[in-house]
Amino acid sequence: MRINPLLANELRLRMRTWRSFAVVSLYVLALGGFCLFFFTTFTSNMAYGYQDPSYVGQSMFYALTFLQCGLLYFLLPGLTANVITQEKERQTFDLLVCTQLTPWNIVLGKLASALSTVFLLIIASLPLYSIVFLLGGVSPVELIILTAILVISAFNYGSYYLFLSTLFQRSAIAVLASYALSLFLAGGTLLINGLYASLISMRGGYGMPLYYLLLVNPLALLEWLFPEQGQEIIGQLIEMASSSPYPATGALSWLRFWQVSLLVHILLALAALWGASRLVDPLRAKRKKRK
Amino acid sequence: MITVKNLTKRFGAFTAVDKISFTVSEGDIFGFVGPNGAGKTTTLRILATLSDRTAGEVEIDGRSIFANARQTRKLIGYMPDFFGVYDDLRVNEYLEFYGEAAGCTLGEARRAIPPLLELVGLKEQMNEFVNHLSRGMKQRLCLARALIHEPQVLLLDEPASGLDPRARIELRQILRELQRMGKTIIISSHILSELAQICSHIGIINHGRLPLCGPISEVLALIEGDALIEIGVLEPVEEARLWLLEQQEIKNVTVNHRGNLEIVFSGGQTDQARLLKALTARFPVFYFNPAGNNLEDLFMKITEEAPHENQPPVS
């Protein structure tokens, strides 16, 4: 099988700069420092009485999960939003288009190269979870689900930011727009829901009718990893919004909020990649404009 | 081999290329001359399938380049008017990457690199990082990149811009070698004299139109018909002016802002030599400068003759 030349070239270029090593080192240092702090606090607390290690292990897993999700979510726009704009700024974009690489080759090669750094960060963090297993309270399946969530989310959000990268000419603007989008998805959806619910309650009503906006919120997928807590929170939201039970009864009893969220994200990501591939092809993009 | 028919490109209300038509035969070097903003780069970008046309058609070997852009890109080697290099790559890695991207296997690309670097004179720099190369070297590397997949057609947009005289001469030699290898080349420049030395055909583009196009010898003959010559004569200037007006090949004589005489001369180089000899025999001449076939003169002439018409090729 032939490796996409763009991916091979990008990996070579990325590994030649100090930036990649700095990002991985800082990332592992941040997570490692957090683990060390947590572990030290736990052992010092042991002096004052017995604490169930599996409870501590579980708490550490939760904390590590949220920290890692947050860090990756914060890093992702910076890693993916400039992949196409950099080619434009370096004036190599036209030269790529002039080759035998199809628009999909260019888009997927660029996405894969950007995500390779994210995957490297995920893999580099895995040994830290051995401390969690040392304490117990967490099963390997949960770690596999966490890794799947991180990988799928990186693909989804990376696709959105890559689309923005094809849309803009300058990296700074593309990165800024991507951070704005990430902020909207994580905080904006919650804020809009909160404000709308307050508005309704001020008028004497009760509910959260825009709860479906939370399908694009990155936290929705965490219900997969923490089904009990997720079910409780989402159940309250849905009850407020439509007075319906969650999970639903009858034929849709198997359907969970995170599954719909995952489907929506994957469809949006595929649409973003399709859009990016259209924008990368100069003839197709112009023809569309002309129509 | 390459046929351009009524090619038009508009950006909103602005018409960058306006119904231009020309043909380039296999093995020709076609020079595209025009001032900045004339439409050279836009035309070359359309030919390189990097931009769509508003109207018209471009065919290579009878097939529309827009029908299957990917197939067209196999036939074309495009060198834009900027470098477009990855500074953190070595010369051979850069060419390997573009070779693979152009559809070659890694092995094919690796085999093609040494003779290519020899052709462009970069064999010694094969393992150097691109950011260590000089401007001229980067320009030659870009030419090697455009050639890595052995295209039949080369589109070179201002390849000599920013090069020193030595590098320009070297580039001319490389282009002649490529012509010997059977490549069809379209090259753009705003310096006519630069193209006159290597091109077999030439097209003059101005304001998106192509008022003159044809074999270089015929185009230059048209220009040579009315050369502008500046002559510096010590007193008596008026007497010299009257004498010049009586000469057969001189259409007009004026005095310019430096106090020198400017004549519109319709003869060739032999006639110029005869005129100079006769002039120096009668007057103390301290300056005799044929303005040459520079672009400015050419455009003056062309725009005066056909400001709104897209003339057919002279031959």
Image (cartoon, coloured by chain):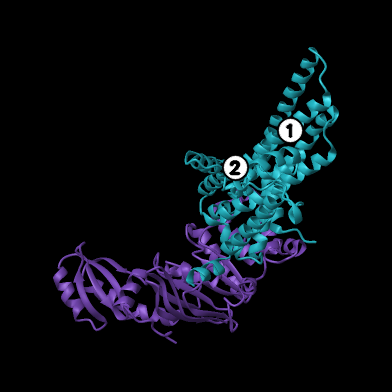
Residue depicted at x 48% and y 39%: A202
Instruction: Name the side, left or right, on which A71 lies relative to B11.
Output: right
Instruction: Name the side, left or right, on which B266 lies relative to A164.
Output: left
Depicted B126 relative to depicted B3: above or below: above
Depicted B14 relative to depicted B59: above or below: above
Task: Residue lying at the far front in this picture: please name it.
Answer: A204
Residue position for label 1: A62
Instruction: Name the side, left or right, on which A32 lies relative to B288.
Output: right
| Chain B shade | purple
Residue depicted at x 57% and y 58%: A93
**To which chain does the residue with label 2 belong?**
A
The disc placed on residue A186 is: 2
Residue toward you, B168 or B315: B315
One can see residue B124 in this view: no
Quarter holding residue A229: top right
**To which chain does the residue with label 1 belong?**
A
Residue toward you, B21 or A89: A89
Amino acid at the residue labelled 2: Ala
| Chain A shade | cyan
